[in-house]
Image: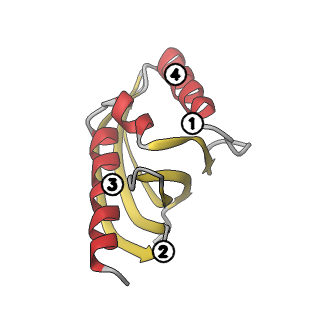
Amino acid sequence: MSSSTVEEVRAAADALVAAFAEGRLEDYFGSFAPDASFVFHTTPQRLESTAAYRALWQSWVDEDDFRIVSCASTGRLIQDLGDTAVFSHDVETVISTRDGEETVRERETIVFARKGDDRWTAVHEHLSPYTS
């Protein structure tokens, strides 16, 4: 496992998680390839593009005044697979809606791919509920 690859993927994951936690949606969605796919335990279908995810996010905002209050990432693992890498972690997110604040605990896997400009870009995200 290349330590430079792990550090590069860690930096890309850190930037993605920070943008999510801070509500910087341009940076957050910009961390994903346009054709990234998303599997969320809270939605009945796979989302097959970042635009589809962004539209879903906007519906949450429109319907529930959805926003992220904070996000903590723990138990991180990065698996170097050459020009791809798998980042998995436990996520504790505080969200706010019209109903108030709620803490959500999940496990997340993000697959990163090294793109032509040597930038690590998220190409798939999968969320599962955290069960202890």
- Give the residue type at disc 1: Thr
| Category of crowding for the residue at label 2, using alpha-carbon neighbours closer than 10 angstroms: few (below 14), some (14–19), many (at least 20) | few
Between tags 2 and 4, which lies in front? 2
Name the secondary structure under disc 4.
helix
Whether 54 is drawn above or below 118: the answer is above
Name the secondary structure under disc 2.
loop
Residue on which the image places disc 4 = 58
| Front position in the image: 112 or 103 | 112
Whether 106 is drawn above or below 38: the answer is below
Residue on which the image places disc 2 = 82
Percent coordinates x, y for residue 86 in the rendering: 48, 68
**Spatial CA span between label 2 and label 1:** 24 Å
Left or right of 46, for residue 75: left
Residue on which the image places disc 3 = 12
Name the secondary structure under disc 3.
helix
Along the polypeptide, which appears first: circle 2 or circle 1? 1
| Category of crowding for the residue at label 1, using alpha-carbon neighbours closer than 10 angstroms: few (below 14), some (14–19), many (at least 20) | many
